[in-house]
Amino acid sequence: MLRICAHPDCKTLTLGMLCVVHEPPVGMVAWPRGRPYSRRQQQLPAGAAPIVTTEAGPTAAGAVSFGGDTAT
């Protein structure tokens, strides 16, 4: 329901208590990107197999063909 802004001498119709002009500013929030936790710090449920990580780095993978016959 529309109502008149609660700020004195303002006649703007709004959905909230105040209109956009009279709303207090919103503070900036820094949101982290990526995983919220490190895999090394992850707590596994009881009875779960441990995560195996290698410090040697990624391993090479061979090419896979599904026989789509798209290359000539």
Image (cartoon, grey):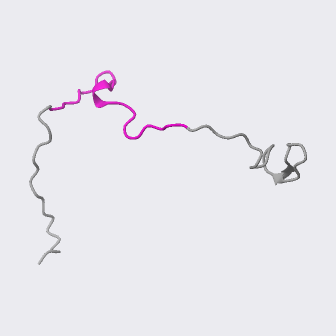
* Membership of 52 in magenta stretch: yes
The image quadrant of residue 69 is bottom left
Give the main secondary structure, helix, strand or loop, of the magenta stretch. loop
Closest to the observer: 47 or 41? 41
Q: Residue shown at 19%/30% (left/top)?
A: 52
Can you give x and y, in whole percent of width and height, for residue 2 in the image?
84, 53
Residue in front for this viewpoint, 24 or 40: 24
On screen, residue 46 above or below 56: above
Image quadrant containing the C terminus: bottom left
| Residue 1 visible in the displayed image | no
Residue 51 visible in image = yes
Residue pictured at 11% horizontal, 43% vertical: 59
Is residue 51 shown above or below 33?
above
Taking the view exactly as shown, the residue that stands out farthest to the top is: 46
Spot occupied by residue 42 in the image (x, y as percentages of width and height): 33, 26
How many numbered callouts? 0
Q: Where is residue 43 shown, x and y percent of the image?
A: 33, 24
Q: Residue at x 80, y 44 (%)?
A: 18
Residue found at the very far right of the displayed protein? 9
Outermost residue toward the bottom in this view: 72
Q: What residue do we see at 90% from left, 47% from top?
A: 9
Give the extent of the magenta segment: 29-54
Image spot of residue 29 (x, y percent): 54, 37
The quarter of the picture where residue 23 lies is top right
Q: Is residue 33 magenta?
A: yes
The answer to whether residue 19 is left or right of residue 27 is right
In the image, is 17 to the left or to the right of 9?
Answer: left
